[in-house]
Image (cartoon, rainbow, N blue to C red):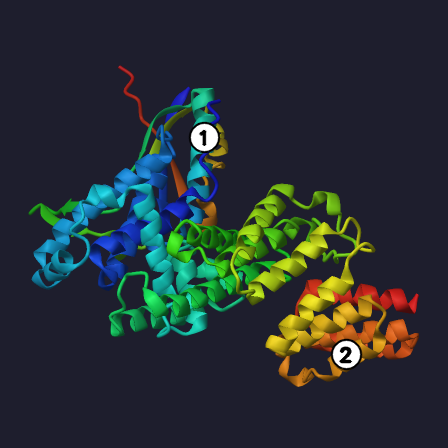
């Protein structure tokens, strides 16, 4: 088994104008997906992320605070899952609930130190 | 799997509650700030609950709203101008008290009365009520009312501007003002309900939601003693009676099933019971409003064990009272329908002749459909087919079109 990070990229929820009803049903889909993965013991870790970010860059360690409104897309959250290979990880990611609102899942295999 | 379920529409209903409570605290002038804050609370819930549901979702949301209120209070206090509003308002009450059930209801009622303030246009009142009280998004309002998104945005912004410009108080009016405003509240709820009940859109979900919201808010009126008048009870009864057969009016594919063909065993008894109770209370009041009459007509239909057993004579009487009070085109057409059922063709024709068809706009097809029925009963099928063709020319909705076509085909067969 290998570990993969599923990275969720989309506009921030704050900027989508979702209605309470839509949020409730979306929350339900996420919850079901999580339940499904938990039941199979796939999930190792995962969390949603706050939309606001601080970026530090350059040799001068320039600090910039960015709000989601300034960005087209943000990383909204991640899961770390275990799967046989990238194909199996893709199947798991197929249940990600936010494709319909322009969301993207990026799958990255985690490099394991083999000493 | 742990199969916990969140109550249907919890977020939507909680949205209206939170906005109302926070508005009580911070005033209508901060409405936009409040709506954003409440929206943020739900986004947080949506993201946290995906991993694990809280033990008591409603309490979680209330708690979050309370914290949000305290946050806001800190923010608002920074600004002196707002500070005065906060401290002189009727909101020195401890925050905790505002979260008691009856205070939440009171806040929601204040919001309903705000939405129905006379300085707002009717169409704007409906949009504003759906947004602020019922927690619909712009997109959902557009879908429910068959409007363009832009139109909804305009209506909402006009309503908000009117509220700011008139410095409308966040309160339930008293005395004579209460009667006028309450009548307006009834009317707006009635219109919202009708959007759901009479719309021929095939999407039963949206229709149920509109009817459900109107019913919920009408029920809220009855929780406050000052608002428990005959009209409030009659309106609630009317909603219950209509809603009890909402599901039997359409096939699974969204095709219309008329009253004659509806499966009466599927009419929802608990709602009929609720309606009957409300109707009894409505009759304790002396004044018989239009809502009384409309509810009485709906009740007659519900009481008939079959379409054939319908007491059309009684229904006719009620419709004539309505017509005498307000001889609108719809009222005349309703009378024509009943006369046709009674085989009274002359009277039906007379009523139809009272209607100015060119003023019916979107609903002109109903008029031609009635003429078709009239000609058919008279034995003149050619004229009937012609009238159906005219109805088809006027109808815009696909479901209605199919229905009329079916009726016409039956004549041609």
Q: Say which quarter of the image contains residue B138.
A: bottom left
Give the label, 1 or 2, closer to the camera: 2
- At x 64% / y 52%, what residue is drawn? B246
Quadrant of the drawing holding the C terminus of chain A:
top left
- At x 71% / y 44%, what residue is drawn? B266
Q: Under tag 2, what secondary structure?
A: helix
Q: Is residue B254 visible?
A: no
Q: Position of residue B145 (x, y in %)?
A: 52, 64
Q: Is residue B264 above or below residue B301?
A: above
| Residue picked out by circle 1 | A89
Residue B390: give its label. 2
Chain letter of mark 2 equals B
User: On the picture, is B33 further left or further right than A60?
Assistant: right
Q: Position of residue B272 (x, y in %)?
A: 62, 47
- At x 70% / y 56%, what residue is drawn? B300
Q: Nearer the viewer, residue B341 or A48?
A: B341
Chain letter of mark 1 equals A
Q: Position of residue A61 (x, y in %)?
A: 9, 45
């Amino acid at each position: 088994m290998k570990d993969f990070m599923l990275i969720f990229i989309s506009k921030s929820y704050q900027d989508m104008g979702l209605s309470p009803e839509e949020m409730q049903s979306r929350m339900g889909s996420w919850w079901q997906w999580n339940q499904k993965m938990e039941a199979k013991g796939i999930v190792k870790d995962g969390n949603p992320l706050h939309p606001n970010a601080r970026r530090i860059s350059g040799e001068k360690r320039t600090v910039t605070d960015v709000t989601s409104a300034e960005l087209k897309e943000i990383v909204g959250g991640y899961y770390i899952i275990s799967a046989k290979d990238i194909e199996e990880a893709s199947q798991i990611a197929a249940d990600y609930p936010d494709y319909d609102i322009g969301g993207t899942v990026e799958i990255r295999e985690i490099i394991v130190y083999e000493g | 799997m742990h199969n916990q379920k969140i109550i249907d529409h919890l977020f939507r209903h909680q949205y209206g509650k939170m906005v109302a409570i926070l508005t009580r605290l911070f005033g209508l002038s901060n409405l936009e700030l409040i709506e954003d804050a409440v929206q943020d609370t739900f986004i947080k819930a949506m993201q946290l609950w995906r991993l694990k549901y809280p033990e008591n979702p409603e309490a979680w949301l209330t708690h979050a709203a309370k914290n949000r209120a305290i946050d806001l209070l800190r923010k608002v206090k920074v600004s002196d101008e707002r500070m005065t509003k906060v401290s002189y308002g009727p909101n020195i009450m401890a925050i905790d008290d505002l979260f008691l059930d009856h205070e939440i209801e009171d806040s929601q009622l204040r919001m309903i009365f705000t939405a129905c303030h006379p300085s707002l246009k009717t169409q704007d009142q409906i949009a504003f009520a759906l947004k602020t009280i019922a927690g619909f998004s712009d997109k959902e309002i557009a879908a429910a009312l068959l409007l363009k998104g832009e139109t909804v945005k305009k209506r909402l912004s006009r309503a908000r501007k009117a509220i700011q410009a008139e410095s409308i108080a966040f309160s339930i009016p008293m005395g004579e003002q209460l009667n006028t405003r309450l009548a307006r509240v009834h009317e707006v709820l009635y219109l919202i309900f009708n959007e759901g009940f009479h719309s021929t859109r095939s999407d039963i979900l949206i229709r149920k939601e509109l009817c459900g919201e109107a019913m919920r808010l009408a029920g809220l009126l009855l929780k406050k003693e000052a608002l428990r008048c005959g009209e409030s009870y009659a309106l609630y009864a009317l909603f219950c009676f209509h809603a009890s057969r909402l599901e039997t009016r359409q096939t699974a594919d969204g095709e219309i099933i008329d009253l004659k063909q509806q499966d009466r065993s599927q009419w929802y008894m608990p709602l009929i019971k609720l309606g009957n109770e409300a109707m009894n209370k409505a009759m304790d009041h002396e004044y018989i409003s239009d809502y009384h009459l409309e509810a009485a007509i709906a009740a007659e239909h519900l009481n008939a064990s079959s379409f054939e057993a319908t007491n059309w004579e009684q229904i006719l009487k009620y419709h004539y009272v309505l017509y005498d009070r307000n001889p609108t085109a719809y009222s005349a057409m309703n009378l024509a329908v009943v006369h046709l059922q009674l085989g009274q063709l002359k009277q039906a024709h007379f009523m139809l002749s009272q209607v100015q068809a060119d003023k019916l706009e979107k609903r002109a097809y109903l008029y031609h459909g009635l003429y078709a029925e009239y000609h058919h009963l008279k034995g003149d099928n050619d004229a009937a087919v012609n009238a159906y063709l005219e109805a088809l020319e006027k109808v815009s909705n696909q479901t209605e079109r199919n229905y009329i076509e079916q009726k016409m085909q039956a004549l041609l067969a």
